Image: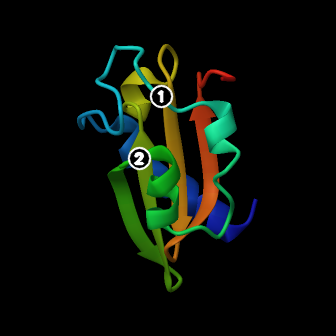
Amino acid sequence: MTLRRMLLCAALIPALTACGGPGGNQSSGTSDCTITLASLEQVKSGMDLAEVEGILGAGTKDSSYTAAGEVTEGYTWCGDVSRDYLNSPVVEITFVDGKVDIVQPYNIPAN
């Protein structure tokens, strides 16, 4: 595992344990998320937040840190990762220096 990935994992721990509110198009515990796998396929590495929000709608920033000169920010759509990812649709996207690095979908319907 690279240092960058280890730092990313360490930075996500607070996001995974936070009790913040839901983001995107859905309230926690409901199933009205409009994001599909087809829409997520349009999100590509290197896109900035504005481009992603043009596809998925507004996200909610849930983490941010700087290490080794890189700024890493986590955003969620359709819910809260720590509460909803097992039962409801949630999308988590990590941006490094303002560009998409990791896209993690949970329970997202195919269409």
Q: Nearer the viewer, residue 89 or 96?
A: 89
Element type at mark 1: loop
Q: Which mark is residue 34?
A: 1
- Please tell me whether residue 40 is drawn above or below residue 27 in the rendered image: below
Q: Residue at x 34, y 14 (%)?
A: 29
Indicate the quadrant where residue 83 lies: top left
Q: Residue at x 59, y 25 (%)?
A: 108
Residue type indicated by callout 1: Thr
Q: How many marks?
A: 2
Which numbered disc, 1 or 2, marks the residue that appears first in the sequence? Answer: 1
Q: Are marks 1 and 2 in contact (CB under 8 Å)?
A: yes
Q: Quadrant of the C terminus?
A: top right
Q: Nearer the viewer, residue 63 or 110?
A: 110
Residue type indicated by callout 2: Gly
On screen, residue 74 versus residue 1, left or right, reads: left
Q: Position of residue 49 (x, y in %)?
A: 46, 64
CA gap, disc 1 and disc 2: 9 Å
On screen, residue 16 versus residue 8, left or right, reads: left
On screen, residue 15 versus residue 43, left or right, reads: left
On screen, residue 59 versus residue 3, left or right, reads: left
- Please tell me whether residue 65 is drawn above or below residue 40 in the rendered image: below
Q: Quadrant of the N terminus?
A: bottom right
Q: Position of residue 104 (x, y in %)?
A: 61, 41
Element type at mark 2: loop
Q: Which mark is residue 45?
A: none
- Please tell me whether residue 39 is drawn above or below residue 93 in the rendered image: above
Report the residue marked by disc 2.
Answer: 57
Specify the color scheme.
rainbow
Q: Residue at x 59, y 63 (%)?
A: 100
Q: Residue at x 48, y 31 (%)?
A: 90
Neighbour class for label 1 at 10 Å: few (<14), some, many (≥20)?
some
Neighbour class for label 2 at 10 Å: few (<14), some, many (≥20)?
some
